[in-house]
Image: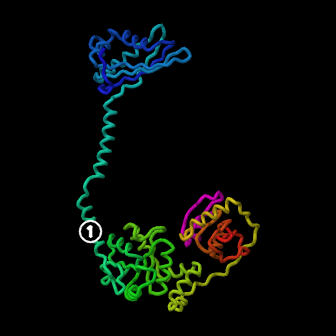
């Protein structure tokens, strides 16, 4: 008996069979050949079609439960659409298999070529994607790569301190002051030729002279070290603007979009002084000792008048559980040096992470905060915002507010 592989078939006839009794697979196949014999004429005789390979091997899968047999019949066909449909319809005339009543229903005639076509399309997509990834860059990409390389080669040494800088320092009205050589290289790569590096922890005379002649923007890393550099520069030089890289990132690694965004959001040097003056005084005093000649000049910038602080009425303190104590301690240790804050709900899940400078603004928009853990000093302004938002705990590095002055529970590193 000739056989046809399903791979060579164009169509596959799928049908279900229900038998009122128990029969075997040979009984089903015998019924198919026997009851369709002579029904469709010589050209569509199933035995002859199978011998010639136009009908493939008939697959019968059955299972018997509670005295009844159910299953499926699969017949591959290389006939055309009309002939395959006729063969499928002929199967439904079978009403008995062996001694049992039976019902056979064709559920679907599958076009194998559609499945193959879908497979071809998906594979073509994969091949095209791989080809595009491995293809040679176009002329614009090549030009951009060469231009970036040339820009990096343009770095020069500027002034008597031989500081790394871009080639356009003298001809530019504005200058960007960064921390190191790698920062200058990254700005050069992205088209900024007016950057110059401090190149150390102390401020060189070259930078101080530039600050007196040009509009200077200080562009530092988004970490605590960046704040220290800003403080030092504002003490010894006339800084016009200040900006920082995104939190946790360095100027040497940020993208063009991040550079432009940072420069657009720069703030004045006076505003930067005011914000940084709210940090613990210990750091500021260390900087004054390093630059005593600037101490008198720095004192003229007084902090703005604050409204008198009215302590909140005392209420019963919330008992701190061991779970909360351990969680607060771990979070506070992880925040050291980040100048960040984490706002928690009553289940100690993090509702959000913000810079310390944005705690008060954030608390105004959140009404279900349970605790705020932050890398900074607990000050009256933050306590006032926490009271207004019904925050239970404030956890900071140290506190400038006594516990009996507020109904918020204040915790510091030493207490944890």
Residue position marked by numbered label 1 in the rendering: 147
Q: Is residue 377 left or right of residue 312?
A: left
| 20 and 154: which is toward the camera | 154
Q: Can residue 390 be seen at all in this image of the molecule?
A: no
Using a 10 Å C-alpha cutoff, classify the residue at mark 1 as few (fewer than 14 neighbours), some (14 to 19) or many (20 or more). Answer: some
Question: Compared with residue 24, is residue 251 higher up or lower down, i.e. above or below?
Answer: below
Quadrant for the C terminus in the image: bottom right
Q: Please say which color scheme the image uses.
A: rainbow
- Where residue 179 sits, quadrant-wise, is bottom left
- Where residue 160 sits, quadrant-wise, is bottom left
Say what secondary structure mark 1 lies in. helix
The question of residue 173 being in magenta is answered with: no
Q: Which residues are magenta?
A: 341-367
Residue 11 position within the rendered picture, expressed as x and y whole percent measured from the top left = 33, 25
Q: Going 48% across and 14% down the picture, which residue do you hit?
A: 19
| 289 and 108: which is toward the camera | 289
């Amino acid at each position: 008996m000739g056989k046809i592989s399903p791979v060579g078939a164009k169509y596959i006839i799928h049908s279900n069979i229900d038998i009122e009794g128990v029969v075997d697979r040979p009984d089903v196949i015998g019924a198919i050949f026997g009851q369709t014999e002579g029904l469709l004429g010589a050209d569509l005789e199933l035995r002859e079609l199978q011998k010639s390979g136009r009908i493939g091997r008939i697959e019968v899968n059955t299972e018997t439960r509670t005295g009844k047999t159910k299953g499926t019949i699969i017949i591959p066909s290389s006939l055309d659409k009309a002939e395959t449909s006729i063969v499928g319809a002929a199967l439904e005339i079978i009403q008995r298999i062996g001694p049992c009543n039976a019902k056979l229903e064709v559920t679907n005639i599958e076009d194998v070529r559609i499945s193959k076509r879908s497979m071809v399309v998906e594979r073509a997509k994969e091949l095209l994607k791989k080809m595009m990834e491995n293809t040679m860059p176009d002329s614009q990409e090549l030009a951009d790569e060469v231009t970036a390389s040339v820009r990096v080669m343009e770095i020069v040494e500027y002034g008597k301190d031989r500081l790394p800088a871009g080639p356009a320092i003298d001809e530019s009205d504005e200058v960007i002051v960064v921390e190191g050589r790698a920062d200058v290289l990254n700005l050069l790569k992205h088209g900024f030729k007016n950057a110059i590096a401090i190149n150390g922890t102390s401020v060189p005379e070259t930078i101080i002279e530039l600050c007196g002649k040009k509009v200077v923007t200080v562009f530092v890393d988004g970490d605590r070290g960046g704040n220290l550099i800003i403080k030092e520069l504002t003490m010894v030089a006339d800084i016009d603007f200040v900006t920082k890289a995104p939190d946790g990132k360095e100027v040497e690694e940020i993208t063009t979009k991040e550079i432009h965004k940072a420069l657009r959001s720069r703030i004045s040097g006076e505003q930067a002084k005011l914000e940084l003056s709210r940090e613990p005084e210990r750091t500021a005093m260390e900087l004054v000792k390093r630059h005593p000649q600037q101490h008198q000049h720095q004192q003229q910038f007084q902090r703005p008048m604050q409204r008198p602080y009215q302590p909140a009425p005392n209420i019963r303190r919330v008992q701190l559980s061991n779970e909360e104590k351990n969680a607060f301690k771990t979070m506070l240790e992880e925040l050291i040096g980040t100048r960040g804050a984490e706002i928690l709900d009553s289940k100690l899940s993090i509702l959000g992470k913000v810079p310390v400078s944005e705690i008060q603004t954030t608390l105004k928009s959140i009404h279900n905060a349970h605790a705020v853990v932050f890398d900074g000093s607990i000050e009256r302004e933050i306590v006032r915002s926490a009271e207004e938002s019904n925050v239970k705990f404030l956890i900071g590095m140290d506190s400038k507010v006594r516990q009996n002055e507020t109904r918020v529970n204040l915790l510091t590193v030493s207490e944890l």
